[in-house]
Image (spheres, grey):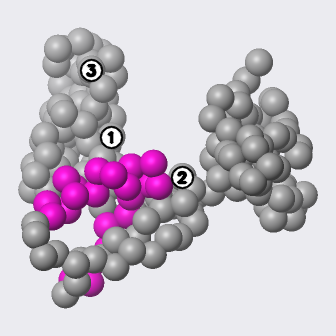
Amino acid sequence: MTLASCIGCGCDDLHACVDDLGPCSWIVVDRDAGRGVCSCCESHMERWNAGDRSVLMLVAKITRDGETEPYFIEKNGIGSFPYFLEVEAGDKFSIEWVEMSQEQFEALPQFEHVRLAEKWLEEITAAGDAESEGKMDEAGTHRAEAQRLSEKVAERGFDVLDLIEADELPASLL
């Protein structure tokens, strides 16, 4: 059986919402798609009936007083925001709760380093593939692009090797 997630709140078969009536249940569920609408999210039935199966997340949009760029944190990660934002005594923030899809969340500028690392992995893998086929010029082009992407990630304070799962790395990098 495929686990299903609610398109309204993200709860799933193993992590139910709880309201005044107790744990939620499925109003509708599509096991093949792994999506449904739970009893706490009846307001999302219109989206469901229109064919929208995207899971909406509740996300905290946090802005430090005096700054203009917000930082976004998933509801279940809100406890870690002092670490992300390097909070000090006296700091003040505004928090606005917003709904967005997983795709919208991952497309936020704060995750650009992750997207760049994924592109780096594509380039470094293509370089290895080209080398194994004896296409050294093509491999060099891919390696140069991988190096450029690695440098862009480093400019953001990260190392590409820390952002890619070890089992995704080409054997030549292990």
Is residue 129 magenta-colored? no
| Disc sitting over residue 166 in the figure | 3
On screen, residue 128 versus residue 52, left or right, reads left
Point out residue 131 in the picture as x, y percentages from the top left corner: 22, 19
Q: Residue furthest front?
A: 20
What element does badge 1 sit on? helix
Q: Amino acid at mark 1?
A: Glu
Is residue 70 magenta-colored? yes
**In the image, what residue occupies the spot 29% across and 50% down?**
80
On screen, residue 88 versus residue 104, left or right, reads left
The one nearer the camera, 23 or 73, is 23
Q: Amino acid at mark 2?
A: Gln
Q: Give the CA distance from mark 3 to mark 2.
A: 23 Å
| Residue ID for mark 1 | 118
**In the image, what residue occupies the spot 81% across and 30% down?**
31
On screen, residue 112 versus residue 59, left or right, reads left
**In the image, what residue occupies the spot 17% across and 50% down?**
153
Q: Nearer the viewer, mark 3 or mark 1?
A: 3
| Dot 3 or dot 2, earlier in sequence | 2
**In the image, what residue occupies the spot 67% across and 45% down?**
17
| Residue ID for mark 2 | 102
| Disc sitting over residue 19 in the figure | none
| Dot 2 or dot 1, earlier in sequence | 2
Q: Nearer the viewer, mark 3 or mark 2?
A: 2
Q: Give the CA distance from mark 2 to mark 1.
A: 17 Å
| Quarter of the C terminus within the rendering | top left
Q: Which residues are magenta?
A: 67-87
- Within 10 Å of disc 2 (Cα), the crowding (few <14, some 14-19, many 20+) is some
Q: Is residue 165 visible?
A: yes
| Dot 3 or dot 1, earlier in sequence | 1
Point out residue 105 in the picture as x, y percentages from the top left corner: 47, 58
